[in-house]
Amino acid sequence: MNIRMAELKDLSAMIEIYNQAMSAGQKTADLTPFTTDDRKQWFEGHTPDKHPIIVAEEKEQVVGYLTISEYRCGRNALRY
């Protein structure tokens, strides 16, 4: 397994992982699946020095990721 900083080319794999976790229920605090376009600005807002995104890959395929983010309003599952 290789652990490294995420690159924009990893975003579509990250979205697949996130949307799968969301569909499993009670995992993400989001209720609507994302597209790559939806998350591009989010990705670009993460910088390695303050809010890194790290991916895990096996056989050159992203199999997981970790991100450090500021709290985000608007997560409908946390509205109460």
Image: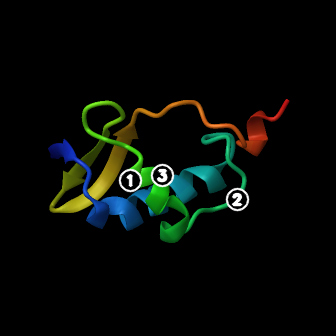
Near mark 3 (Cα within 10 A), the count class, few <14, some 14-19 or many ≥20, is: few
Q: Residue at x 24, y 62 (%)?
A: 61
Tell me the crowding category of disc 1: few under 14, some 14 to 19, or many 20 or more residues within 10 angstroms, Cα based: few
Front-most of 57 and 5? 5
The residue identified by callout 2 is 32
Locate residue 29, reporting x and y percent: 67, 40
- Residue 73, image x, y percentages: 69, 37
Distance between mark 3 and mark 2 Cα atoms: 16 Å
Q: Quadrant of residue 40?
A: bottom left
Of helix, strand and loop, which one carries label 1? helix
Percent of width and height locating residue 36: 48, 68
Quadrant of res 76: top right
Alpha carbon separation for disc pair 3 and 1: 6 Å
Residue wearing tag 3: 42
Give the mark, 3 or 2, whose residue is nearer the N terminus.
2
Find out whether the residues at labels 3 and 1 contact each other: C-beta distance under 8 Å: yes
Q: Nearer the viewer, residue 31 or 75?
A: 75
Q: Amino acid at mark 1?
A: Glu
- Disc 3 secondary structure class: helix
Amino acid type of the residue tagged 3 in the rendering: Trp
Q: Cβ–Cβ below 8 Å for labels 1 and 2?
A: no
For label 1, the residue is 44
Side of 6 where 64 appears, left or right: right
Front-most of 35 and 62?
Answer: 35
